[in-house]
Image (tube, grey):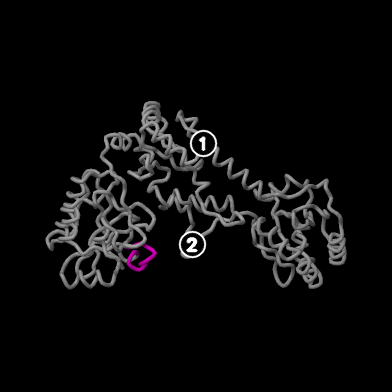
Amino acid sequence: MKNLKWAMVFVIATLVGINNAEAGGDGIKFTKSSWDKVLKKAKKEGKNIFVDCYTTWCGPCKLMDKKTFTDPKVAAFYNENFINVKMDMETPEGLALNQYFYVSVYPTFLYLDSDGNTLEKATGYRPVDNFLELGQQALSAPIKKKYGKVNLVAEKKKENDLQKNKYFTMVKNAGYNVEIKEWETTMADAKATDKNIMAIYGDTYWPLKEEMTIDKNVKYLSENFELKVVSLMNSYVKDEDGEIVKDENDNLLVNDWLQKYSPSSYPGVVFINSNGDKLVDGGQAQATEIGQLVQKGIFKPMIGFPESIENAGLAVYYAKAKEEAFKKSTEENKPLMIMWYRTKGNDLHPNYSDEEVKSKLSKNFVLLALKRDQAPEIAKKYQYRGSGSLSVAKPNGELLNNYYGDPTMTKVQMLEMLDKIIQSVSPKKETIQGTGMMGIQPAKKTN
């Protein structure tokens, strides 16, 4: 998930909007809001907008910051009558603004109405009295059409679409037979052709893996699957102002598609049947190998943990009451197995629904299902390895090992993994080695 985290940071830096700064002292208060919210705030408060167009190397700009913007009379007038914005004209946002105004001298002062129309434009260092007079003129000035209207909202949408099309074009240029279409259309086309779907997931800062560009692999995947290109750039949830939003735990929110199909590798591929059920996902380097297994029909739809574990059918044998589970493990002298999961993800492998697998789990372990944000102290102590991983602890609560199985593992491989885990809880054996497709990792000692 680290790649996703850094990808999300990249996207926010690209989309979040104007990078404003606070003026020092008790001077003019420059808003930190995005341009969308500046316009909305100006309308709501019935104010015009003042934009200080500057560069970091500009001497007169620094003099304005030091002498004019901090003057009490200037601050009182501008804070009362304007929504104030500071714009570094050498940032992407500044360059976008300059598509509407020819700004070649620094500082340049723009006075706009709440729709972004130009009222006044001036340049150069201004002492206090002159700067106050300039602001007063702007309050009664008519709209000056020659400078146009700022519409950075449209600019961000254009950039958003450009990034989306860039990734689509990159996939298409690799030889894949792809089209831009809605998800419902993709599923309908898969039904009509009796194919499963392969979603190619990533963005332009993640080049396609070399294995995905080999001619024979491109041909195989294009011929045997209905293809869908999914761009991370367009996967984030935004508010009415176009801002990317976070949840109560400060995590970025992604759209319903990503919530439902939750790729575990970035860039990656997700295989989905024509009913919209996730079958398996993996890295792009293994796309052809996983695709061949999908074609053999060995994958059932992933199960996933529902919002409520009560009456949850196949997943119900995992408890969610952590205190009770730890207590039961001690009382019954039985090792504890924790399944880490995402509420809306598909982390529970279909083989966990098999009766033989369920029986072996229930007989040998006290089972607990947890989300990391439900129990951050346990995640830290047990060295959380990611959603879908397993942490196994001794009855006294001491961490034994962490385990993570490849999503393509078969029932036989899963049973073999469980046998090795069971053997590892014996006093004679407390560490094991990974075999085959299973990445079984010895745990480190916690502090």
Residue highlighted by disc 2: 247
Amino acid type assigned to the residue bearing label 2 in the image = Asp
Around disc 1, counting alpha carbons within 10 Å, would you say few (fewer than 14), some (14 to 19), or many (20 or more)? few
Mark 2: which secondary structure?
A: loop
| Front position in the image: 189 or 116 | 189
Please give the name of the residue rendered at 33% of the width and 36% of the height, measured from the top-left corner. Answer: 291
Amino acid type assigned to the residue bearing label 1 in the image = Ile
Question: Could you tell me if residue 287 is visible in this image?
Answer: yes
| Front position in the image: 363 or 387 | 363
Which residue ends up furthest to the left in the rendered image? 428
324 is within the stretch colored magenta: no
| Front position in the image: 55 or 340 | 340
Instruction: Name the side, left or right, on which 411 lies relative to 26.
Output: left
The x, y position of residue 433, in whole percent, is: 20, 51
Mark 2 and mark 1: Cα distance apart in space: 30 Å
Quadrant in the picture for the C terminus: bottom left
The x, y position of residue 382, in whole percent, is: 30, 63
Sooner in the amino-acid sequence: mark 2 or mark 1 = 1
Instruction: Name the side, left or right, on which 440 lies relative to 259.
Output: left
Please give the name of the residue rendered at 47% of the width and 32% of the height, measured from the top-left corner. Answer: 178
The x, y position of residue 31, in whole percent, is: 68, 63
Please give the range of residues in magenta.
370-379
Question: Could you tell me if residue 123 is visible in this image?
Answer: no
Please give the name of the residue rendered at 38% of the width and 35% of the height, measured from the top-left corner. Answer: 191
| Front position in the image: 104 or 77 | 77
Residue highlighted by disc 1: 180
Q: Residue 111 carries which label?
A: none
